[in-house]
Image: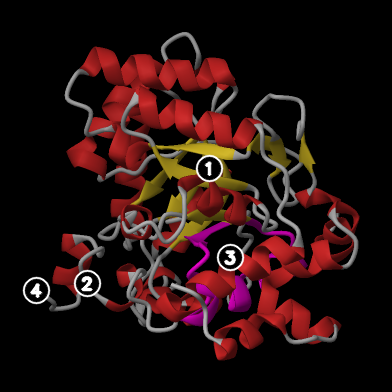
Amino acid sequence: MKPTKQETDFWSKRLDRRQLLKTLGVAGAALALGGPEGLTELVGPASAAVGIGTGEVPTRALGKTGVQVSALCFGGAHWGRIDSEAEAIRVLQEALDAGVTFLDNAWEYNGGRSEDLMGKALQGRRQQAFLMTKVCSHGRDKRVALQQLDESLRRLKTDYLDLWQIHEVVYADDPDRHFAPNGAADALLEAKRQGKVRFLGFTGHKDPKIHLKMLAHDFPFDTCQMPLNVFDGTYRSFEQEVLPVLTQRGIAPLAMKSLSGNAEPIKQGLVTVEEALRYVLSLPVASLISGIDSRQVLQQNLGIVRRFTPMTVVEMQALRTRVVRYAMDGQFERFKSSRDYDGRIGREQHGLS
């Protein structure tokens, strides 16, 4: 369906520098201001990618940590649902061989199966991976959170994590719970003091205001995980509200839900997988976390990141104009407005069904 003149004008009007940052996002404005050099100007050299145009999986700086991670992160939730253990291990090891060394997981994924499988897959290869897992919704208490950490380390067959994140910060009072005395934030600091984790972060998919409430605390977060996709810019926009704060503070943005959670826009033919991933990778993110549940999906995503070049501002405008009518009400980002994507235990803690 052809965009209306109003929709085209929404993205095509001339903008000054400040408006451009607000409407297109940091990366889009950077590209408008001079391509990759503009991106470096706005968010610093930490966001510059290494390996673009080489046919390899690019790497990017993880904020101010001094560590480079693969621009594509191997998601552990979908992967942990592969029926065959041997096939699951084969897929992950193939990703490692291809240069996808940033691995995502969480204590609760598939009842612990994702961590168990990943631990088996990493036997003899732990040093090749940048390994991340998360303390989950009922780990708000410091004691319980540290218990979860020990269970995660046991399952993953390692004595340390590269990154440990508070998972699913999605309710308005979650930041208060996490930063209460002996809350999950204290657990993160204690785990780092003990040498069990290197870096710290948090995740959430609901509302940028909740992310900003977490960031308002004087806490040494290294990473922040959030939804970023071509539909995000007009409805509870993490790109507009949170991404600039992260880049300013040198906290590494980790992108998720690049296909809008259930890939419905792909199924309906509104965008292609390559357009969706390329759009997000054109933002100043450290890595894009992608659900990979088969060799076919792995090879598809490897092809996209290997041939990746940043979108121009014109390409970003055109893509957003094309989908703006579908983006304004959040219909393809149900994780922001419904409880369907919220963890069961978190819902129960808040008295929700």
Q: Judge depth for marks 1 and 2 and give the one in front.
A: 2
**CB contact under 8 Å: marks 1 and 4:** no
- Quick one: which residue is furthest to the top in this view? 124
The answer to whether mark 2 and mark 4 are in CB contact below 8 A is no
Q: Select label 2 or label 4 by which is in front.
A: 2
Query: Which is nearer the eye, 47 or 214?
Result: 47
Q: Which residue is mark 3?
A: 319
Disc 2 marks which amino acid? Arg
Name the residue at 54% across, 29% down.
302
Name the residue beneath numbered marker 1.
Answer: 163
Q: Tell me how far mark 1 sits from mark 3, CA to CA.
A: 33 Å
Magenta residues, start to end: 224-252
Can you tell which quarter of the image residue 187 is in? bottom left
Q: Nearer the viewer, mark 1 or mark 4?
A: 4
Using the rendered image of the protein, determine whether residue 189 is visible from the camera's viewpoint.
no
Which residue is denoted by mark 2 in the rendering? Answer: 339
Q: Nearer the viewer, mark 3 or mark 4?
A: 3
Task: Give the total of numbered labels.
Answer: 4
Q: CA distance from mark 2 to mark 3?
A: 28 Å
Dot 1 or dot 2: first in sequence order is 1
Q: CA distance from mark 1 to mark 4?
A: 31 Å
Disc nearer the start of the sequence (1/4): 1
Residue at 36 percent of width and 74 percent of height = 174
SS for dot 2: loop
What amino acid type should be assigned to the residue bearing mark 4? Answer: Ser
Mark 4 lies on a secondary structure that is loop
Q: Amino acid at mark 3?
A: Leu
Residue 46 image position (x, y, % from top left): 79, 50
